[in-house]
Image: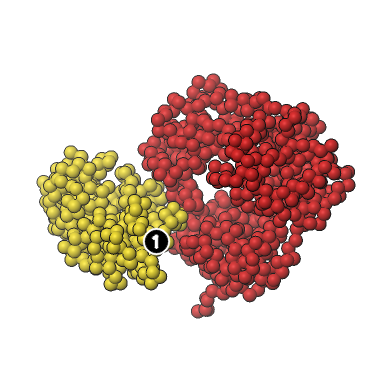
Amino acid sequence: MITITKAGHHGILLPELNIGLDYSGSKADHIFISHAHADHMPRNRSLTVYCTRPTSRFMKLRGFTGKMIEMDFEQPLETDHARITLFPAGHILGSAMTFIESDKGSVLYTGDYRTPPSPATEGFKIPEAPIDQFITEATFSLPIYKWKSHDELAMQACTFARQTLEDGYTPIFLAYNLGKAQELMFMLKKLNHPMQIHGAGFKLCKVYEEEGFDLGDYETYQRENCEGKILIAPSSAPESGFASNLKKVRTAYCSGWASNEARRTQLTADELIPLSDHLDFFELIDLCEAIRPKKVWITHTPNPKVVEHFLSKKGITSGFLDLEASAND
Amino acid sequence: MIDQKTQPNSFKNLCEVAQSIFETRGNNAKIKLAAEYFGDLADENDLRLAAQFLGEGAFSDVSGKRASVGHRTIAVLASEFCEIDYDLVFKQCRTVTGSSSETIQKLLENLPEARKKWKGLNLTLHEVAEVYEQLYITPKRDLKQQIIKEIWTKMSPLEVKYFIRIMGQGSLRIGFETRSVVSAIAKAFEKDAEKVRYAHMITGSLGETAVLAKNNRLGEATFELFHPLSFMLASPIESRAVEEFDQYIAEEKFDGMRCQAHISNNKVALYSRDLNEITSSFPEIIEFFSGKNLPDFVLDGEICVFKNDTILPFQLLQKRMGVKKPSDKLLTQYPVIFVSYDVLYYKDQPCFSNTLLERRVLLEQIAETHQIPLSSQMEITSREDVERLFERALAHGNEGLMLKRKDSKYEYGQRRKSWLKVKKPSGSLDVVILYAHAGSGKRGGTYSDFTLGISVKDDERYEEEFIPIGKAYGGYSNDELAELNKRINTITLERFGPTLLLKPELMVELEFEDIQVNNRTKAKYTLRLPRFKAIRWDLSPNDADTLKDVEQLYQQKLEKERESQGGNPSFIIPT
């Protein structure tokens, strides 16, 4: 089996193959970046890395200055020791799972992923070849997490926006500015109502457009001109004065964490939309059961023991690969 | 399939209303929802239960009944029901949500093993009330468990969540407390909110109050002797800007315990702040009031240890509290008196609607006729007066000063600005954070409670470096809490379910009201009302105060010179 080592804050290293996964150390010849969220991007901004085309665009817009070699999904790259193929992860646009095949076996590293995939992504696909070791994130790693379908959540978002506008209020969606924000816009565009998105998220939208995702009628947030538009901003924005000139607003917090009741009082949001870009606990267990790898490695979770426990009941061996927990949802 | 349309009087409907109230922002909107619900209930027994379940719990507060099912029992039972491991799975889930009942709701909804077992059968409010009654009369834990398991199979997960919360007799955690239920009753039946509140105070039951309001019988709620009234409470003066000092009178804030005395002829009953009867602990007060052939009256006042013309520390009064039959020795060592400062009822007439000045005239008259100790009242006109009298109160060993508005009614059960308290925190200590605990309720998902330690490094009695001195869960800002949570991540040594053992590193300046001896703790002292004053990023654990410092503070407090009452007393015994 391929040796997998955690590299602390620097990601994962496969030392025999000189391969790094979401890695920013100096011991790998080939580094693969799963997606452009800050906790997966290399900390060392001048590395040479492999990633999908949208990921490279996002990383550039977010300040990565190193060399990026773009790869297409399902188009393998051959190195001296291994064959590496990217598969769509369904998390955000460009997000990729990295599949490594070598004489010593195979590894699939998921990065962050979601199945069923987010509609504003390239989809989700598992390699057909056998997977020996499955390194999976488990952000929502407890059986209290079970998502509603995308259609239901889209309906909730649309109904909230429509009702709020009808009542003469301005709806504000609080959503992370890469991925979640655009996914929401993708859901809300059918309302045919002008949207404004916070500047940090706005500049990323063009990558979606380039990749053929129509995000509807939107422009960048303008304080003086935002009343009556559908507004989208990261959850920290209201504290720093976002739309604070408007008296009649209602806010919807959009995140997997919104499924916890405590969030309602913590955030004083009017609506909680538990829209996650990670898979839920049951989807995780089901997927592991479908793949049946020789070993499951769990990362990005505060509760590895619970996942291990449920997997062991299904006869699946697993272990915890202790990486830094994900801050973004 | 049977039509499962929700009936107004079903338990499910109550739960759905509660959930909507939780998900609605704005108090008026919440009240409107509850009022519509109350209005929809045709039957008065349903209404009684609905108001009680929403605002009080499984039983009316005055009934004295409890389901008596512990949190752990419920959690273990739910784990069994869902076929999951309690320690490994349930506890982790609860840490994240901060709520057992929410966790159980989700597990019942999500886990296929649990889904098979329940069917929402649309139980009525009455049927659920019967279950609570069964739990009350069943003393055995295993029978209680059976009853609960059985009823859960007939409820939806949402119903189970509220079934548990209502059973706990606590808050439903939907941002809708007693006062809002009272407003909703008033709104539903178009009654004056003040009249509804009065009826609630008198009956002590929200259910009864709702029924009286519905039937236009609020006037029938009348005060009865030996049913304690909720106490009027004071706000800290810091939070209120006092403008017209001459509208207030000042009294010393006695270093004792609050007490309501009900007297009728030779019958006497004493009630504590939490409305429990404490009569038997203080025989000398009973003796004092008995045998005087007194008329009916109710006094609000304070029990203090009083010896050699001096009010002695609250710590000494604690030796009498909760002792049902005090020994002669205890009675001689720590003799107590009752100092009155308000009158709520006199000869068949409640007087809490009279102004303070009017009540005072009456109180002085009663006190003089029957030689009952009563507080000294002082006129004030300026902040300087307040400061001077405050110092004098402290010299007497009292806690501080009370300012009471002359034209105020007795606002039972409320903490408003008619009474203001002037207090000084008793002290502060520099302590180190030893453990962080996951918060519950609205603090679910963050570590918000902290066990704090003092240094015993150089103390030969202990082997540890630090030992716990108290637990604090307030006094910090949201930003500070976020910063603490960030830091905690980096210094966690071990995790025990919802508790993290931390490397002793983070220093806190801890403020508290009082130090008390408590032999059940490792330090043998506990702090009263400990809270963060400041997070001291500038200090290291080497700067932590020691157990010896705590002991010294306690001794200082106990031995602090107390002025005898002398010529300038905090209370008068009419002769």
> Which quadrant would residue A90 be assigned to in this image?
bottom left
Tell me the residue at 75%/58% (across/down). B223
- Palette colour of chain B: red
The reply to whether residue B425 is in sight is: yes
Q: Nearer the viewer, residue A264 or B417?
A: B417
Above-or-below relation of B343 to A290? above
Q: Nearer the viewer, residue B152 or B544?
A: B544
Q: Nearer the viewer, residue B12 or A303?
A: B12
The residue at which mark 1 appears reads as: A247
Residue A211, given in percent of the width and then of the height, sits at 17, 63
Q: Nearer the viewer, residue A245 or B22?
A: A245
Tell me the residue at 44%/36% (across/down). B535
Above-or-below relation of A76 to B159? above
Tell me the residue at 55%/31% (across/down). B427
Tell me the residue at 50%/52% (across/down). B441
Identify by letter the chain in yellow. Answer: A
Three-letter amino acid code of the residue under disc 1: Lys
**Chain letter, disc 1 residue:** A
The reply to whether residue B519 is in sight is: no
